Image: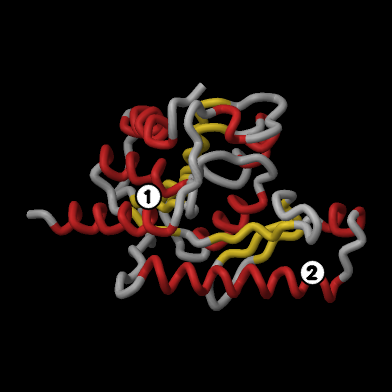
Amino acid sequence: MLRDRQDAGRLLAARLSAMTLDRPVVLALPRGGVPVAAEIATILGAPLDLVLVRKIGAPAQPELALGAVVEGAEADIVLDDVLLRYLHVGSAQADQLVARARAELERRGQRYRACRSPVELAGRDVIIVDDGIATGASIRVAIQAVRRRRPGRIILAVPVAAADQVTALQAEVDVVVCQEAPADLSAVSRHYLSFPQVDDAEVIACLEAAGRRNQDP
């Protein structure tokens, strides 16, 4: 059981610190992944940035992920075609859900990044961080987007993930670092003693703190 997201970040950072890393960059999936990633970035002395991904929720069950979309001019989209058919979500409705998710990504990008430029990833070890993985839709589009930026290695660091997702994702990245991998993951929150909602203000505060740290002489 994990105490909270900060504790999870420290546990992952201890394992990452034992690895030989080439100019690591830590990329968080907002919002829940940011406090985890902030701890890792601080301990590793690495830059902190974001990879903005938005889950596409089912029309009547928004917590049920039909897929995910990531920001960018060449936006990556992952959709669960089997689930779409099961829930009778047609192509027109799916397009509407994707458009809504992309609009929210644009809003978050403007709010979080302001005048900050993305960190250069080419040739560097990139550590992608979230606070948990259930279906894997969000993390997969994040991996696709990061790979386009030609990193040296892609390392996935996550406190808790379903065991089958860990196995599948090991084929998609160079290294997976996972603290807990239960066979049956019904809810990520059940593996934390404290799992409050992360709001925009906390995301921005983490980014600003990381920016100040990286500017220190």
Number of numbered discs overlaid on the protein picture? 2
Q: Residue furthest top?
A: 1
> Could you tell me residue 128's position as x and y percent?
46, 48
Q: Give the amino acid at mark 2.
A: Ala
Image point (82%, 72%), residue name? 93
Relative horizontal placement of residue 148, taking residue 100 as reference (left or right) = left
Residue at image position (75%, 56%) is 66
Q: Which mark is residue 184?
A: none
SS for callout 1: strand
Q: Secondary structure at mark 2?
A: helix
In the rendered image, which residue does mark 1 sit on?
A: 26
| Earlier-in-chain disc, 1 versus 2 | 1
Q: Position of residue 205 (x, y in %)?
A: 31, 55
Residue at the spot 42% in from the left edge and 74% down from the top edge: 110
Residue that mark 2 sits on? 94
Q: Is residue 27 left or right of residue 83?
A: left
Q: Is residue 41 above or below residue 85?
A: above
